[in-house]
Image (spheres, coloured by chain):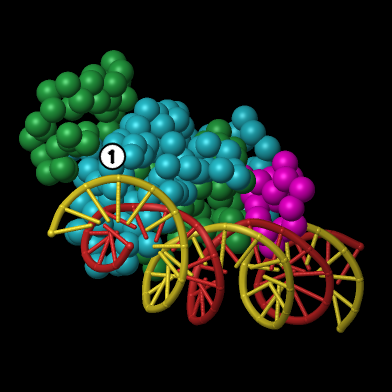
Chain colours: A green, B cyan, C red, D yellow
DNA sequence: CCTTCAATTAACCACTTGGTTAATCGATAG
DNA sequence: CTATCGATTAACCAAGTGGTTAATTGAAGG
């Protein structure tokens, strides 16, 4: 893994194939062949998707004879969830609309930017 | 935007600079210069990060004279949050440990994989 | 006017990513 | 022993990403 854990998690989730793999894994462990079957891409492509997921800590692989059993390690999703959670108040109850309104009408805000004076 | 909204959101979040920009924006709107100041990268680099965020619908830009005021559009984070939310039960109460245990001891699971018989 | 300033676009570079096919590895079956 | 099967690795390719510097646009100010 070359980047921070949060970036690795989000990057792993930024691909629909990998999200579908996780969704499949959420309903139970599966072999690589099982995971590959819904997709029309080659086995090596699946194998690398799994490596990305494993590097991000989102799955674990276990060898069983000549099969690799994959299972979800969902706790690795927790960091991403927690990060998003801190923004929850911004989208709930249309609060961001309210904030925007206050910013605009109250004028002098509590923070830096040039107080958006329109041309005088 | 070339990909599905969820992929675009996760991809936008998969970069620490962009997450820091969003964090800064969460405490109030800011100009591009304001957003750029904490970082040691060039202005064009910031500009492109902002374009990624805007394409993902995470920010909006508004022209004010020669400044561009950026503000957060946090509701675009909701899709990502909801997606993760469906996995919450998998990491809470160490449930995934439990699932793993049940899978392993109950043996014949309700789903496909080769029922992991060890070499007989 | 001309300059200066905020920001973006253009052109370029190194590196990563997602896909392919071909080759390899380990375990099982005959 | 050999063939086969599941899965991975190797080598390659096209496209995307994150960074740079240089050039460009648009609005303010002397």
Mark 1 surroundings: few (<14), some (14-19) or many (≥20) residues within 10 A: some
Q: Is residue B18 left or right of residue A23?
A: left
Residue drawn at (23%, 21%), measured in percent from left and top? Answer: A101
Residue drawn at (59%, 52%), measured in percent from left and top? Answer: A69
Q: Is residue A96 left or right of residue B61?
A: left
In the rendering, at what x and y percent does residue B69 appear? 28, 41
Locate the N terminus of chain A and report the quarter of the image it occupies: bottom left
B6 vs C29: above or below:
above
SS for callout 1: strand
Q: Residue furthest top?
A: A93
B22 vs B40: above or below:
above
Locate the C terminus of chain A and report the quarter of the image it occupies: top left
Residue at mark 1: B64
Q: Is residue A118 left or right of residue B110?
A: left
In the rendering, at what x and y percent does residue A74 appear? 41, 42
Residue A69 visible here: yes
The part of the chain drawn in magenta is A29-47
Residue B95 falls in image quadrant: top left
Residue drawn at (27%, 33%), measured in percent from left and top? Answer: A87
């Amino acid at each position: 893994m070359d980047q921070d854990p949060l970036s690795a998690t989000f990057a792993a989730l930024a691909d629909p194939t990998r999200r579908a793999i996780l969704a499949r894994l959420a309903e139970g462990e599966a072999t690589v062949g099982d995971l590959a079957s819904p997709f029309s891409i080659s086995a090596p492509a699946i194998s690398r998707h799994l490596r990305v997921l494993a590097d991000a800590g989102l799955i674990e692989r276990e060898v069983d004879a000549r099969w690799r059993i994959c299972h979800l390690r969902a706790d690795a999703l927790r960091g991403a969830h927690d990060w998003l959670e801190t923004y929850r108040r911004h989208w709930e109850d249309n609060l961001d609309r309210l904030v925007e309104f206050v910013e605009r009408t109250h004028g002098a805000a509590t923070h830096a930017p040039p107080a958006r004076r329109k041309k005088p």
